[in-house]
Amino acid sequence: MSKNGPVALVYHTLFVIFMLAPILVVCFVAFTPEGYLSFPTDRWSLRWFYAIGRYPEFISAFWRSLWLGALSSAIAVAFSVPAALAIGRHRFRGRDAMTALFMSPLMIPHVVLGIAFLRFFTELGLGGTFVGLVLAHIVVVLPFALRLTLASAVGLDRSIEHAAISLGASDRTVLRRITLPLVLPGLISGSALAFINSFDEVTMTVFIAAPGTETLPVRMFLYIQDNIDPLVTSVSAVVIAVTVLALIALDRAYGLERLLVGRSADGR
Amino acid sequence: MSFLSLEGLSKRFGTHTAVDGLTLSVEKGEFVSLLGPSGCGKTTTLQMIAGFVEPSGGAIRLEGRDLLAVKPAKRGLGIVFQSYALFPHMTVVENVAFGLEMQGVAAAERTRRVGETLELVGLGAFTGRYPRQMSGGQQQRVALARALVIRPQILLLDEPLSNLDAKLREEMQIELRQIQRTVGTTTILVTHDQAEAMALSDRVVVMNHGRAEQIGPPHEAYERPATPFVANFLGRTNLVNGTTVRPEKIWFATSGLAGKVRTRIFQGNHWLYQVETAGGLVTVIRQNTGEAMPGEGEAVHLAWAAT
């Protein structure tokens, strides 16, 4: 590995500061005893953390966001596995069109999706329901799930499956014992990325969520429109803490590099 | 009746003919190599026997039965792939046991046969490892064990040694030959390496443009090549005064074709000469016996036995 020169080092340092500063500021502000956003502060208090307890809608929104992320990413991955195996390993009519269709949510602004889904769900009687949220989030996170699953499927050596067939394995056994385990790393990475995108989504969700089905980002967004107190900073600090703990746990259990780069278990 | 027979086997991809009416009979226990340059149809032929490619025409029979009517999973053939194609998420034992598991062999019997086969390929001590923890040569042996353990009717080898370095390749050739003799499995090897084909096979099938140019024992194909292509593919040749002569069959004499040594290269066990003659440039290979040999620029006479 080559060493960085002084200019590169300064650039990297500034870049990292630029990335981390807003997050750190939010965490500092969360500990203020004041009733407004104050930074810097020389006095510390857990006041705004205790305050979260007085707003049960934040806590229920947090759980709703978790469920929404888990459900929509799981369903998106379940769809993307057969799609990725077909697109990644076969040449057929409409293959490019199919890929473009699954990837199209990336191209459409979320504001547009939000308005479209609002109209659509109202017609269907799904307006403001959790089911509606799940359906909309599946559409938005599908490209992320598919991209990483596809990367695994394309890299799969067909002769491994041929070897299994020659040893007497049926198509179903090949899928269960060979193909699925080999695309599993892409599947896990795809789920993680899909979950993060669902948990983070606010632009579209703000249109289709109703009181009672608000996700955490939507609740926070609506709260800061009417209030200027530091409650959202303490909520943010909790979310950041949960994220950091989850990432450490994932790194210990699975390896972050493998998770985010989608590398397979044998390092290929 | 032969054990395995290919009858007028053909495969066309669009307008391209990969295999063009190949007919071949293989006896039980025989080691046959399909030899040829890349694109000659040898791998396509192997894949048609394995069932991964559907022939455009012709038939494949195993002990008289139509093999094309049998699904690839039911053909009972052992295949060793060029990339080894080991299951990366399984240990050596799990890899080798997979085929027996598919056949429904009981666990105790499975363990015994996997152990036996791993001993046969010299990997008795590597049972718990994953493929990624092994060298190329070791992975090669696992692939061979995995194919052999199901006691296949035919063993198909697709360029199995081409990913190994030269020295290891030579060792594996000797070992592969011994293992094949021990188990007696009918074997078809696909290779572009003429030395490998000649070292291992009872018969070679020299292929070019989807056709068999010559089918016969390696020694016969080398000494009496049916076509110029076979002569060139199986080793160096000289075309002198209208006859083809192998470089090692030419010697320096006091009379004969006059020439001048242009280059002389020492290669340990032999000398490699390029001699300029009236009939063109002639390649001569002389064994290194320790005697003094003509140097560069020297005038020489070349002689060879008439065939």
Image: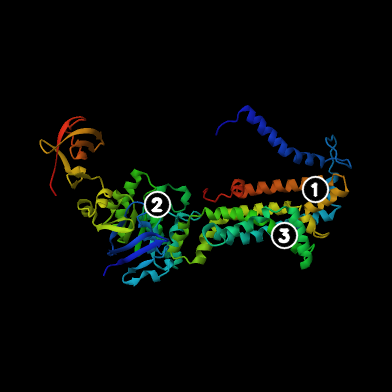
Q: Is residue A53 left or right of residue A92?
A: right
Residue A136's label in the rendered image is 3
Task: State the quadrant of the N terminus of chain A.
Answer: top right
Res. A63 in view: no
Which amino acid, mark 2?
Gln
Q: How is the image coloured?
A: rainbow
Is residue A108 visible in the rendered image? The answer is: yes
Residue at x 74%, y 64% (from the top left corner): A131
The answer to which image quadrant residue A195 occupies is: bottom right
Q: Nearer the viewer, mark 3 or mark 1?
A: 3
Whether marks 1 and 2 lie on the same chain? no
Question: SS class of the residue under badge 2?
Answer: helix
Q: Which mark is residue B140?
A: 2
Q: Give the CA distance from mark 3 to mark 1.
A: 25 Å
Q: Which residue is mark 1?
A: A235
- Residue type at the position of mark 3: Ala
Residue at the spot x=51%, y=50% of the render?
A266
Q: Secondary structure at mark 1?
A: helix
Q: How far across and down, in percent of the image, does residue B72 sit?
A: 42, 66
Residue found at the far right of this picture = A35
Q: Residues within 10 Å of mark 2 (few under 14, many from 20)?
A: many
Residue B148 percent coordinates (x, y): 37, 60
